[in-house]
Amino acid sequence: MRIPEIKDKRALYRKLAAAAALVFLATLGTLLARHMNLGPARPVPTFRDTGPADAPIVIEEFTDFACPACRHAYSGVKEIRKAYPDKVRVVFKHYPLTNIHPWSVEAAMRADCAGRQGKFEEYANLLFEFQRDWALEREPRKIFDEYVEKAGLDRTALDACLADPATERQVRGDMAEGDMRGINATPTFFVNGKRAVGLGQLVDKARPLMISLK
Amino acid sequence: MKDLKTASFAQWAALAGRAALGLVFAWAGFLKAAAPAEEFAYAIETYRLFPAWMATLASLTVPWAEIYLGLLLAAGLFTRITAGLTGALIVFFQVLLAQAMVRGLPITSCGCFGTAKSNPIEVELGLNFILLALAFLAWSRGRDLLSLDGAIEALPSGGGEKEKP
């Protein structure tokens, strides 16, 4: 039996050329969509998504709990949220720089586990506020545990959450998204999709939007 | 290529099936290719059939295959081949879903459309039968109407003998 597609050589070459053009355009389109962040939004846990869902300004924040610049930027973002509670939505995403901050992934996991108990912000505040105490420690788990007490978390539930593979997967998923979006420094923000690295750039990008809303 | 005015219902149905199946496949592939590969790799791992390296490899290749197959099918290019391959891929997905259902694996998202919300496995299994029927329609009559296959074959072969004056 002859397959209908290849009974005529000239037609076959034309079809191959058309298929190559289609494949080329599809590849180009998909890669461009990836580059321009036009792909589907990756869901984050609700405790890391603050502000109104229909806010005109959406800030995605890729952060490492052990990075000093992130600590500085985190308080800056809090100020923005405070000043524009109805206009700004902040989506917090983990981007631990594992090559220089060996405990960042665990810190992020612990913050997420605190989030499952409704205390993400409390735990994140402690991690940033006392960053110098744990970030360079060889074995900071005791310090992390102190924050569990301070934040008033259920220790057993937190341990179970840390042992759940889904917790690490969520953090690694954020990191993979950050890699795909070309992040190589923290903190990196996307203000309505536009990249800003560091608090200075964030303010520069967000200010005109905020002024236009006044 | 058949004249649109004289086309039968079966040919129109095959055209609709070919376009629908192609676009569903291309969209599903795009949603996965535009997201981090790790997400889809994780979805594959939940089926507990493949080692991690195979899941990673599949997460990097399957979405692109879906995009290319889907677009070629929707355009009606190499229709029988692409419809056959698409059908084979759906059968493979069915095997994955069915074994997960039989083993009672706790799969919350089939991974079919990336991180988008998915239906329960049983529903996905049923929907895939519909897609399989569309693949058969596309394979059997899909090149009859509005296909690039038909359009290219209708072109003059060119480069042959010149007409004598």
Image (spheres, grey):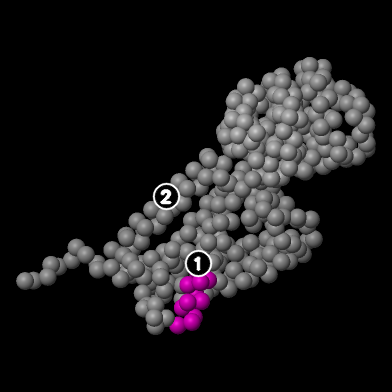
Relative to A47, residue B118 above or below: below
User: How many C-alpha atoms fall within 10 Å of the one at disc 1: few (<14), some, or many (≥20)?
Assistant: many
Instruction: Say left or right for A72 vs A21.
Output: right
Q: Position of residue B102 (x, y in %)?
A: 77, 64
Q: Is residue A143 magenta?
A: no
Looking at the rendered image, the disc whose residue lies closer to the viewer, 1 or 2, is 1
Residue toward you, B100 or A66: A66
Tell me whether the residue at label 1 lies in contact with that at label 2, contact meaning CB atoms closer than 8 angstroms. no
Q: Which mark is residue A24?
A: 2
Residue A202 quadrant: top right
Q: Amino acid at mark 1?
A: Ala
Quarter of the figure with the C terminus of chain A: top right
Q: Is residue B17 magenta?
A: yes
Residue wearing tag 1: B19
Label 1: chain letter: B
Instruction: Say left or right for A206 vs A157.
Output: left
- Disc 1 is placed on an element classified as helix
Question: Magenta segment range?
Answer: B8-18
How far apart are labels 1 and 2 at the CA level? 20 Å
Q: Residue furthest left?
A: B165
Residue at image coords 52%, 63%: B22
Q: Residue furthest front?
A: A214
Residue at image coords 36%, 78%: B3
Residue toward you, B151 or A150: A150
- Disc 2 is placed on an element classified as helix
- Magenta stretch secondary structure, dominant: helix
User: How many C-alpha atoms fall within 10 Å of the one at disc 2: few (<14), some, or many (≥20)?
Assistant: few
Quarter of the figure with the N terminus of chain A: bottom left
Could you confirm whether marks 1 and 2 are on the same chain? no
